[in-house]
């Protein structure tokens, strides 16, 4: 191995991973970020305001998780929605 291989490996080890997500519109950014954060932290971090805002945010996150194929996040969104508005 030459020195350039070693420096490339060292640089790759210190760089942050790049995640690219296609959005239907700029309005989807917050929900998509919530899904990506969920993948790293295991919890949904959305608004803590009025229940109608939380419900709208959870629905948007559910849609983003569905679009991104992250079923575990879809399940977390559904559970959160059912804790706010009981599901039948």
Image: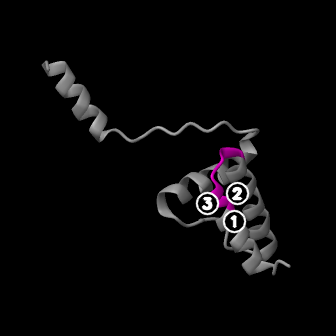
In the rendered image, which residue does mark 1 sit on?
Answer: 77
Mark 3: secondary structure: helix
Q: Which residues are magenta?
A: 67-74
Instruction: Look at the image and tell me in which quarter the N terminus lies.
Output: top left
Q: Are marks 3 and 2 in contact (CB under 8 Å)?
A: no
The answer to whether the residues at label 1 and label 2 have Cβ atoms under 8 Å apart is yes
**Residue 17 place in picture, x, y as percent:** 42, 40
In the shown orientation, is residue 52 left or right of residue 46? right
Residue indicated by mark 3: 72
Q: Which tag, 1 or 2, sits closer to the chain's start?
A: 2
Majority secondary structure in the magenta region: helix
Lower position in the chain sequence, tag 3 or tag 1: 3
Residue under numbered circle 2 = 61
Please tell me whether mark 1 or mark 2 is closer to you in this view. Answer: 1
Relative horizontal placement of residue 12, taking residue 32 as reference (left or right) = left
Q: Position of residue 43 (x, y in %)?
A: 55, 67
Q: Quadrant of residue 50?
A: bottom right
- Residue 18 is situated, as x and y percent measured from the top left of the image, at 47, 37
85 vs 70: above or below: below
């Amino acid at each position: 191995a030459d020195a350039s291989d070693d420096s490339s490996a060292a640089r790759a080890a210190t760089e942050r991973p790049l995640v690219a997500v296609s959005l239907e519109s700029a309005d989807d950014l917050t929900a998509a970020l919530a899904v990506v954060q969920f993948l790293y932290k295991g919890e949904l971090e959305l608004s803590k305001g009025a229940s109608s805002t939380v419900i709208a945010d959870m629905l948007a996150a559910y849609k983003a998780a569905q679009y991104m194929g992250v079923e575990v996040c879809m399940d977390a969104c559904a559970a959160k929605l059912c804790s706010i508005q009981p599901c039948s």
